[in-house]
Image: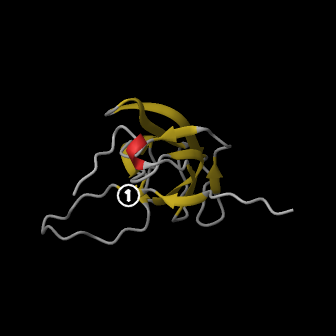
Amino acid sequence: MAYTHSKYEVAMSPVQAISASGAATTVDGALIDATGVSARWRPGYVPHVIRGAAVMSSATVQHNAAISIGFEADITTLGTPTRVFTIVLPTTAGQHKSIFYTPTFDIELAPGMLMTANVTAAATAAVRAQITLYVEPRWEVPGNVTSMLSTT
């Protein structure tokens, strides 16, 4: 029996600084060697339910301590993040062989709400990670979403 659904993965966009010359640099994942927001994602047209998340290191790194990435969303008050879950990468996290994920969640984001990956315990060496959300759209007419405005 086939199970039909519309769940899919989205890569969170890395937060990156622009170089002194103003040119953007090519990045492979979000930096996780400094504390603070490293990636973000928001739904644009229909509400989405966050079903889970995964983090995969893009380089082999030995950490002195575990890396902790807190996922925060402005689900209660717009612009005020609320911690909804955390993924911890142990000291043995390595490239392409260590994917750390969370179980199923039921967190709904309306269009414009922001989900961020906030590194609270960073790697001790320069490293990036692919941060992915497992999402499911909740089909809704845009006119029923109060945060959306129609334009001509």
Q: Residue 39 location in percent, x, y?
A: 40, 52
User: What kind of colouring is applied to the model shown?
Assistant: secondary structure
Rendered residue at 81%/63% (across/down): 2
Q: How would you rate the neighbour count of disc 1 (Cα within 10 Å): few for under 14, some for 14-19, many for 20 or more?
A: many
**Would you place residue 113 above or below residue 128 in this image?**
above
- Residue furthest to the right in view is 1
Is residue 27 visible to us here? yes
Instruction: Tell me the quadrant of the picture where the N terminus can be found.
Output: bottom right
Q: Residue 61 location in percent, x, y?
A: 53, 59
- Residue furthest to the top in view is 76
The number of numbered badges drawn on the structure is 1
Q: Which residue is mark 1?
A: 14
Rendered residue at 50%/47% (across/down): 140
Q: Nearer the viewer, residue 149 or 17?
A: 149
Amino acid type, label 1: Pro
Instruction: Indicate the quadrant where residue 21 lies.
Output: bottom left
Q: Nearer the viewer, residue 145 or 128?
A: 145
Rendered residue at 55%/64% (across/down): 60
Rendered residue at 55%/55% (across/down): 62
Instruction: Indicate the quadrant where residue 86 lies.
Output: top right
Q: Residue 40 location in percent, x, y?
A: 39, 50
Q: Residue 82 location in percent, x, y?
A: 44, 30
Q: Nearer the viewer, residue 32 or 62?
A: 32
